[in-house]
Image (tube, helix red, strand yellow):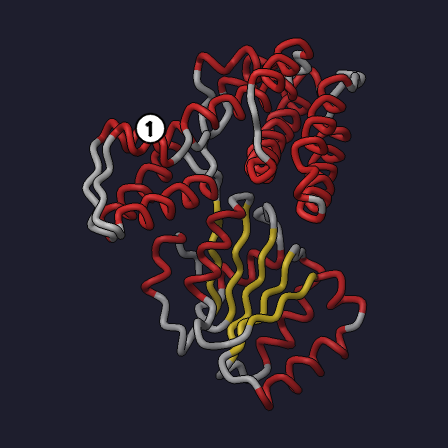
Amino acid sequence: MILKYFEIEKIDLKKTKLFLLYGKNTSLIKDTINKIAFSDGERFQYDEKEILENEKIFFENILVESLFDKNKTIIINRSTDKILKVINEIFDKSLENNIVIITAENLEKKSKLRSLFEKERNLVCIPFYPDTEKTLLKSAIDFFKDERIPISQINLNQILNKNSGDRENLLNELKKIKYFVKNGKKITTETLSKLINLSEDYSTTELVDNCLAKNKNKTINILNENSFKNEDCIAVLRIFLSKTKRILTLAQDYEKNKNIDLTISSARPPIFWKDKEIVKKQIMSWNIKNLKKLIFEISEIEILIKKNLNSGVHLLYNFVIKQTLQKFNNEI
C-alpha cells in the first residue's frame, strides 16, 4: 500500500515489517528510517549489489543474527528491480522480530519492485519527493510547536532562507536552537543571527555559487575576504554537495528539453528570481558527466579533511580554486 511520509504514525509495526522508501529526498528518507526502525535493536546495512553477489551468506547472516539479536532493522540500500527475488524470499520468512527497509532512488511506475509494494496490503511504499518551501515550513512549524518554543514569522523566515531548501541543514539549525533555549534563553532576531551564523553562511553560499558558475575573480575575492576556520570546512562542503546535486538535476532536465529558460522556470523547488542568472551560468558551465565526478570528489575531499583537520582550510581552498579554474565542454 502507498502512504505519505507523515502518515508513518498510522502503521502498526507489529503487523507491518517490509517497507520501500524511494525518491531523491535522502534527508527525509533518513528521518523516516529513524521513525520506523526499532529503537532498542541493532541495524544491519546492506547494498543491493553485495546481497546479489552472495545471497546465501546474506540469508545465513539474517538467520544467525536472529538467534542472538532481538528487534533487528535490516536496511537494503540502492535497490532496483534486481532485488525483487530476494524480497520475495524475505517475505516468505518469519519477520516477527525484524523490520526490513528497502531504499531506492527514483523508481518509474513500471518498476516491478514499486508495483509489488504498492499493491500488497502487508507492504508499505512511501515516495519521497524533493522538498518545497511549503514542506520545509511545515517541518519548522511542527518542530517549534512540539518543542513549545515561541518563534516570530520573521525569525522563522530567516531560518528557512538560510537553508537554501536543504532539509538536513534545516534540521541541524533547529537542533542548535533546541539546545540554546534549554538554558532558559529566548530567541530574538539578534541571537538567532549569531546562533545560525547567517552572515557567515551567506558568504559560504556566495562562494559555492560563484565557484560553480566559474566566476574566478569573485570566488578568489570571497576566499581572500573571509577567514574560514578548519571546523567550518565540512559545513562548506555540505553546501557544495547540496548545490551540486541540484545543478545536476537541472542539467539533466536541460538535456531533455534543450531550453534553459524552461529548465529554470520548471525547477522544483522554485529558483528565486535573484538567483536565476547565476544558476543559468552554472548549468552552462558544467556537463552531466563532470557534475557526477564533482559529487564524488566532494565526498573524497570531505574524507581527506576529516583525516587532516588541521589542514582543512588549505585543502578546501585548493579544492575550490581547482573547481573554479577547470573548464569543460558545455555540451550537456
Which residue occupies the extreme bottom position in the image?
67
* Quarter occupied by the C terminus: top right
Q: Position of residue 21 (x, y in %)?
A: 52, 56
Query: Measured from the top left, where is residue 2 in percent x and y?
Result: 43, 57
Q: Nearer the viewer, residue 25 or 237?
A: 237
Q: Residue at x 50, y 22 (%)?
A: 266
* In the image, residue 37 above or below residue 98: above
Q: Secondary structure at mark 1?
A: helix
Identified at 69% across, 42% down, the residue is 305
Say which residue label 1 marks. 158
Q: Is residue 129 above or below residue 81?
A: above
In this image, 114 relative to 48: left or right? Answer: left
Q: Position of residue 175 (x, y in %)?
A: 38, 48
- Which x, y percent locates residue 107? 60, 48
Residue type at numbered disc 1: Gln
Residue sitting at x 63%, y 66%: 45
Tell me if 117 is positioned left or right of 192 in this view. right
